[in-house]
């Protein structure tokens, strides 16, 4: 959910100006915002599943330290979505385990 | 290899303040940060700061950030963004990544101002999506303008827990409860009073027994603690929450100082292992200074003062200030810092800092 009106901060008038494709589905996003923010705004909280036990993970530290929020972005696995900015047309995939490179056999 | 006079790692409040001081003294500064924009965590601080007028008390954090950015721009500080520093090597060589490429930078002096990271807390369910650092939630609501959840349990009643609870409410979330393991609230009374007035129950001597949910947070079970911090059976209650925020302190981000070979000491009051440093913020390596949370977790206002101190001392060692002029400038900063480190919380930090500085002097050249 996006926070438009706020008692301290100015009203956020910026509308989504980009589309990212998350597991094949188009999600509205704002160019330059962290991928994780666009996902939370769309109500998506599960970003990856762990290698050993297949347990879900989402955003945890939000500053690029913990690597819990990593996903496969444009074919590259282990991208920290909390510090990686959105670009229009990005392909974002829920990562399973350590992920696979798009050109991997 | 690219060369500079003073390299500052981290463009948060401490790094920006240090950069301003060195540039004001006439030095050439390169400020490096891994993020896409400078300011560190200042831009998510939408509350008014405490302190006196010279600490810009009453000014909101993000406005202070904007002022610092303007000053660094006016002074012509070189800022390298999107540039995570991954290593410090002998001869003051800084290795960093930029646009996927490895880059090198050699500096006469280095100021490390890397800040701190939030502590986790071990409980069943901590890894479920929906459990996050309070700072992460604060970034989402105040910088990215996105709510991470609607019904929040906040763990920890220090200033971060209290302030972020209030800001989550300002962003439209409901804070279902705030719990604190200790028998009393950790942060300032004014912050606690604000969220109490808003109707948020604060449970002291309580902890989280587990977070419930198969794939994401669906609830949380809290439990009362006795005076030996043991869970009291039968006092469990289940809260209807979809998000759990953890605000149980921070740990200095010290990797680069370890790598460089700075000597360390362990000070629990300041967040754990911190590089030894003297009153000039100089480490056991004479060319390496530190400032802000890496030298002990405090607040943004003290981080800025420490940044100024490191900047002035660094300028002095470069010959940009006479010892007399530097002594005068440093005295002013110390006076301001002493007034910041007052009150029951501030005094504890001041005592910890003083004893750290004392034990460090022996090891310093």
Image (tube, coloured by chain):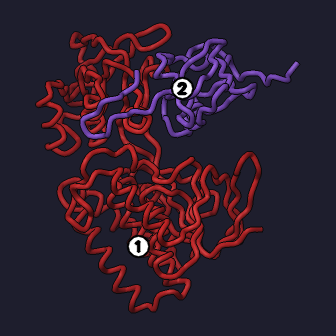
Chain colours: A purple, B red
Q: Image point 49% across, 35% down: which residue?
A: A62
Q: Secondary structure at mark 2?
A: strand
Q: Position of residue A7 (x, y in %)?
A: 24, 35
What chain does badge 1 belong to? Answer: B
Residue B137 at what x, y percent from top left? 40, 32
Relative depth, front residue between A90 and B199: A90
- At x 76%, y 53%, the residue is B102
Relative depth, front residue between B100 and B269 = B100
Same chain, marks 1 and 2?
no
Query: Which residue sits at x=50%, y=59%?
Result: B113
Question: Around disc 1, counting alpha carbons within 10 Å, would you say few (fewer than 14), some (14 to 19), or many (20 or more)?
Answer: many
**Residue hosting label 2:** A29
* Residue A19 visible, this orientation: yes
Q: What is the CA distance from the residue labelled 1 to the residue labelled 2?
A: 42 Å
Numbered disc 1: secondary structure: helix
- Residue A51 visible to the viewer: no
Chain bearing mark 2: A
Placement of the N terminus of chain A among the 4 image quadrants: top left
How far across and down, in percent of the image, does residue B20 sit? 46, 70
Residue B262 located left or right of residue B133: right
Quick check: B61 above or below B1?
above
Residues at circles 1 and 2 in contact by the CB criterion of under 8 Å = no
In this picture, residue B235 sits left or right of residue B93 = left
Tell me if residue B146 comes above or below residue B186 in the rendering.
above
Task: Give x and y (percent) for residue B295.
Answer: 44, 60
Residue beneath disc 1: B309
| Image: B135 above or below B230 | below
Quadrant in the picture for the C terminus of chain A: top right
**Image check: A16 left or right of A8?**
right
Q: Residue furthest top?
A: B214
Mark identifier at residue B353: none
Which residue is depicted at the point 26% across and 31% down?
Answer: B170
């Amino acid at each position: 959910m996006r926070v438009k009106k706020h008692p301290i901060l100015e009203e956020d008038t910026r509308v989504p100006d980009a589309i990212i494709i998350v597991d094949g589905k188009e999600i509205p996003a704002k160019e330059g915002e962290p991928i994780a923010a666009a996902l939370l705004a769309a109500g998506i909280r599960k970003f990856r599943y762990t290698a050993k036990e297949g347990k879900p993970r989402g955003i945890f530290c939000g500053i690029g330290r913990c690597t819990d929020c990593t996903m496969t972005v444009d074919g590259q696995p282990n991208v920290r979505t909390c510090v990686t900015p959105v670009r229009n047309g990005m392909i974002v995939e829920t990562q399973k385990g350590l992920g696979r490179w798009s050109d991997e056999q | 290899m690219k060369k500079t006079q003073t390299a500052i790692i981290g463009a948060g409040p401490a790094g920006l303040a240090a950069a301003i001081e060195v540039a004001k003294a006439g030095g050439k500064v390169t400020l490096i940060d891994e993020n896409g924009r400078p300011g560190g965590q200042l831009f998510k601080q939408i509350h008014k700061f405490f302190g006196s007028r010279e600490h810009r008390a009453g000014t909101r954090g993000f406005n202070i950030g904007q002022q610092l950015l303007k000053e660094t721009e006016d002074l012509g500080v070189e800022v390298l963004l999107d540039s995570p520093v991954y290593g410090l090597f002998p001869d003051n060589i800084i290795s960093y990544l930029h646009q996927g490429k490895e880059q090198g930078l050699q500096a006469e002096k280095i100021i490390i101002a890397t800040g701190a990271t939030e502590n986790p807390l071990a409980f069943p369910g901590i890894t479920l999506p929906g459990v996050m650092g309070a700072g992460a939630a604060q970034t989402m609501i105040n910088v990215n303008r996105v709510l991470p959840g609607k019904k929040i349990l906040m763990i920890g009643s220090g200033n971060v827990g209290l302030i972020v609870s209030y800001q989550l409410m300002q962003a439209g979330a409901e804070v279902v409860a705030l719990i604190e393991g200790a028998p009393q609230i950790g942060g300032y009374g004014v912050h606690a009073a604000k969220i109490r007035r808003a109707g948020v129950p604060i449970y002291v001597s309580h902890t989280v027994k587990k977070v419930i949910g198969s794939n994401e947070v669906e609830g949380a079970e809290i439990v009362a603690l006795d005076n030996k911090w043991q869970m009291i059976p039968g006092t469990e209650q289940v809260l209807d929450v979809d998000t759990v925020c953890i605000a149980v302190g921070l740990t200095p981000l010290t990797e680069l100082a370890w790598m460089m070979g700075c000597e360390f000491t362990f000070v629990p009051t300041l967040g754990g292992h911190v590089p030894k440093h003297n009153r000039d913020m100089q480490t056991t390596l004479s060319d390496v200074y530190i400032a802000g949370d890496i030298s002990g977790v405090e607040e943004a206002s003290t981080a800025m003062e420490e940044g100024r101190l490191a900047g002035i001392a660094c300028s002095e060692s470069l010959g940009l200030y006479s010892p007399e002029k530097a002594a005068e400038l440093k005295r002013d900063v110390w006076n301001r810092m002493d007034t910041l480190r007052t009150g029951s919380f501030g005094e504890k930090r001041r005592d910890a800092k003083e004893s750290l500085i004392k034990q460090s002097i022996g090891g310093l050249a």
